[in-house]
């Protein structure tokens, strides 16, 4: 049965984010993911936000989606996750990746320094720390000198944010799930790469949760909903691999223009370059019926967790409830 999560950008007041997490919890969603972004433009701290959600919810699994080892030291990720797991009574999950335009560029951090090695090492460090081992390390993601969590949380599931083939293969090797932000046309390609990684590590790829995180907006007309997701689609387009965008029929010339403007002038100029093709490929936006048919295609293609990424619609709470009552039952038949 398909699982459901919500993904929030942490750009709302923390109290509002907690309210939406409570709505997801009350509607029996499986996951709440909170993005870890940096101060420009104004985002809240991911772990403070998740702490509020941990106290305010009862059942839903919660975690950052995603932290990266360039802006956060692995040992600090580990202690934050252990603390979150304690506060939530064992409901913590970790989304880990190399970061993107929102998390790295404002800090002047390079995109990306030896990403496969960095993530492989970070997963290894975290798993050891979660299980109570003492870790010494000197490598691409910094140093650890006799670091040990006490008390240790035990096993915490790790999902990798992956788009390109090598990171997808690494997901199959070492992770519990993948956090995609992929067009429909790229899903089967991504799953095949995950299978290759799982085979290499002698793992069952079917135990890897295939989660796809796309902006979701529901409205009375398709046009109204599509307008709501442009900001998010802009960043996904900028950070997606050319191969995935080409598979979805998006002009790479227009993608390069968008990336250039985003880098030099910022999102408010870049968002003007978001095309209909980008919105079609990188969001779920429209009327109830439009969204229902789009979700069905993703589930049929192999997605096992749907992540509804904000903005949801003019009334986010109502949009979540509409999804639960009118769309989700059709996906679970």
Image (cartoon, rainbow, N blue to C red):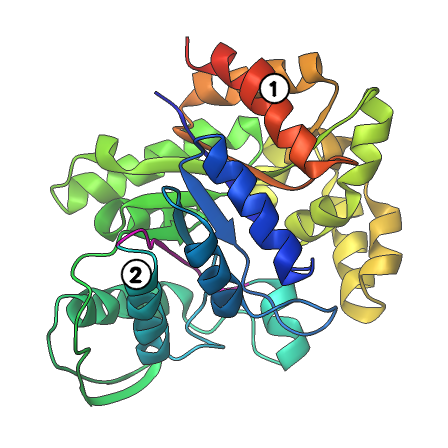
Q: How many marks?
A: 2
**Residue 93 x %, y %:** 34, 53
**Residue 329 x %, y %:** 48, 13
Residue 91 showing in the rendered view: yes
Q: Residues within 10 Å of mark 2 (few under 14, many from 20)?
A: many
**Residue 219 x %, y %:** 78, 25
Residue 64 showing in the rendered view: no
Tell me if residue 213 comes above or below residue 236 in the rendering: above
Assign the C terminus to one quadrant of the image: top left
- Rendered residue at 36%/79% (across/down): 76
- Which of 259 and 211 lies nearest the eye of the viewer? 211
Mark 2 sits on what residue? 85
For the record, the magenta segment spans: 90-99
- Which of 67 and 151 lies nearest the eye of the viewer? 151
Q: Residue furthest bottom?
A: 145
Mark 1 sits on what residue? 294
Q: Nearer the viewer, mark 2 or mark 1?
A: 2
Q: Main secondary structure of the magenta part?
A: loop
């Amino acid at each position: 049965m398909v699982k459901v999560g919500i993904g929030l950008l942490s750009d709302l007041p923390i109290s509002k984010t907690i309210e939406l997490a409570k709505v997801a919890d009350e509607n029996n969603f499986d996951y709440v993911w909170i993005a870890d972004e940096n101060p420009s433009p104004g985002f809240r701290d991911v772990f403070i936000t998740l702490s509020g959600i941990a106290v305010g919810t009862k059942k839903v699994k919660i975690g950052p989606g995603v932290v990266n080892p360039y802006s956060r030291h692995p040992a600090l990720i580990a202690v934050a996750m252990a603390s979150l797991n304690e506060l939530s009574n064992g409901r913590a999950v970790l989304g880990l990746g190399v970061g993107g335009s929102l998390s790295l560029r404002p800090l002047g951090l390079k995109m990306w320094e030896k990403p496969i090695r960095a993530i492989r090492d970070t997963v290894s460090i975290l798993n050891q720390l979660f299980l109570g081992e003492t870790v010494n390390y000197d490598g691409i993601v910094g140093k650890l000198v006799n670091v040990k969590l006490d008390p240790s949380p035990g096993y915490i599931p790790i999902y990798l944010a992956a788009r390109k083939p090598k990171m997808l293969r690494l997901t199959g090797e070492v992770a519990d799930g993948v956090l995609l932000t992929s067009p429909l046309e790229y899903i089967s390609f991504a799953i095949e790469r995950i299978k290759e990684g799982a085979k290499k590590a002698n793992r069952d790829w079917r135990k890897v949760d295939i989660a796809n995180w796309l902006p979701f907006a529901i409205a009375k007309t398709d046009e109204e909903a599509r307008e709501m997701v442009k900001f998010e689609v802009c960043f996904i387009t900028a950070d997606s691999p050319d191969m995935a965008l080409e598979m979805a029929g998006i002009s790479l010339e227009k993608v390069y223009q968008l990336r250039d403007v985003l880098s030099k002038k910022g999102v408010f100029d870049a968002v003007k370059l978001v095309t209909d093709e980008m919105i079609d490929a990188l969001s779920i936006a429209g009327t109830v019926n439009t969204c229902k048919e789009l979700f069905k295609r993703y589930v049929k293609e192999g997605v096992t967790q749907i992540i509804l990424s904000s903005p949801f619609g003019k009334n986010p709470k109502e949009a979540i409830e509409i999804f639960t009552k009118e769309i989700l039952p059709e996906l679970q038949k």
